């Protein structure tokens, strides 16, 4: 019996490196509603901030649906 595959969760630093953008750009896009929201691990309130992770498949889908520049083919 096989278990369903779970989406891979990646850190903000990995998202930034993958897309070659800053953390502030990612968070701006999330706030603008143009980029996938992170998965919050742990409580959202409290003395220590919870960790945020992005689903790799959602970031890939976002990237696949981006318009290409006019110079590309």
Image (tube, helix red, strand yellow):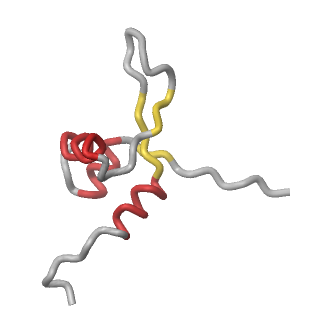
Foreground of the two, 52 or 30: 30
Number of marks: 0
Foreground of the two, 21 or 69: 69
* Residue for point 42% across, 63% down: 61
* Image height of 42 relative to 14, above or below: above
* Residue for point 47% across, 49% down: 55
In the rendered view of the protein, which quadrant contains the C terminus? bottom left
* Residue for point 34% across, 64% down: 63
Instruction: Give percent across and percent down for residue 39.
Output: 47, 38
Instruction: Give percent across and percent down for residue 25.
Output: 19, 46
- Outermost residue, front side: 33
Instruction: Give percent across and percent down for residue 59.
Output: 40, 56
- Outermost residue, top side: 47
Instruction: Give percent across and percent down for residue 45.
Output: 42, 15
- Outermost residue, left side: 71
- 42 left or right of 60? right
- Outermost residue, right side: 1
Query: Which quarter of the picture shows residue 49?
Result: top left
In the rendered view of the protein, which quadrant contains the N terminus? bottom right
* Image height of 53 relative to 15, above or below: above
- 14 left or right of 8? left
* Residue for point 27% across, 57% down: 19
* Image height of 40 relative to 43, above or below: below
Foreground of the two, 5 or 31: 31
């Amino acid at each position: 019996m096989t278990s369903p595959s779970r989406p891979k969760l990646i850190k903000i630093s990995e998202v930034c490196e993958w897309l070659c953008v800053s953390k502030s750009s990612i968070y701006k896009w999330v706030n603008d509603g143009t980029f996938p929201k992170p998965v919050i691990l742990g409580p959202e309130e409290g003395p220590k901030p919870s960790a945020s992770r992005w689903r790799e498949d959602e970031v890939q889908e976002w990237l696949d649906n981006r318009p290409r520049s006019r110079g590309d083919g």
